[in-house]
Image: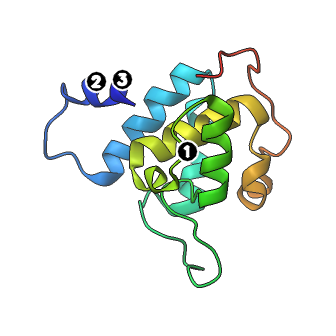
Amino acid sequence: MIELLVAVVLYPLNMTEESFTKHAIEFYSEKYHVPYDDAWRMAHCESRFQNVRSQFWRTEDSFGPYQLQSEFYSRNAKRRGMYENPILRTSVEANVNMAIWVASQDGWSAWRNCAIKENLLGKKYNQELVLK
């Protein structure tokens, strides 16, 4: 995750959360070979670029631009050999990094409703990327 933080040093410190989220999407889309437009549309559909908990917070614990749930984050962090604490998903960068990496490996099926709405369900990307 330090990759993006170093890159952002080149940007103004008064960057808004939405502009930081869009920059993170651009950075990780390029890193994991997922089209920026696809990743942008999914984050917009899921959260409108807000790093907030789900509107359904009483019944689920989704959080962040890609509305990642604790179990989803932990399971995929373990799959990547990363630290599995789900609190990390509340970081914009960690949320975007994990979501786009998962999309690069599995497509957008984990975000079924938005994937259908955005016509991205079943779309596959480069699955030969290194897991980390």
- The residue located at (69%, 34%) in the rendering is 79
Report the amino acid beneath label 2: Ala
Which residue position holds label 3? 3
Q: Nearer the viewer, residue 65 or 87?
A: 87
Confirm or deny contact between disc 1 and disc 2 (CB under 8 A): no
- The residue located at (33%, 27%) in the rendering is 2
In whole angstroms, how far apart are the C-alphas of marks 2 and 3? 6 Å
Q: Determine the secondary structure under disc 2.
A: helix
Confirm or deny contact between disc 2 and disc 3 (CB under 8 A): yes
Mark 1 or 2, which is nearer the eye?
1
Left or right, residue 92 beside residue 70 = left
Q: Is residue 113 above or below residue 35?
A: below
Q: Nearer the viewer, residue 98 or 55?
A: 98
Q: Nearer the viewer, residue 48 or 51?
A: 51
* Residue 7, disc: 2
Comes first in the chain, label 1 or label 2: 2
Residue 105 at x, y percent in the picture: 74, 29
- The residue located at (63%, 30%) in the rendering is 80
Residue 95 at x, y percent in the picture: 49, 47
Comes first in the chain, label 1 or label 3: 3
Which residue position holds label 1? 84
Of all residues shown, which one is farthest toward the right?
Answer: 122
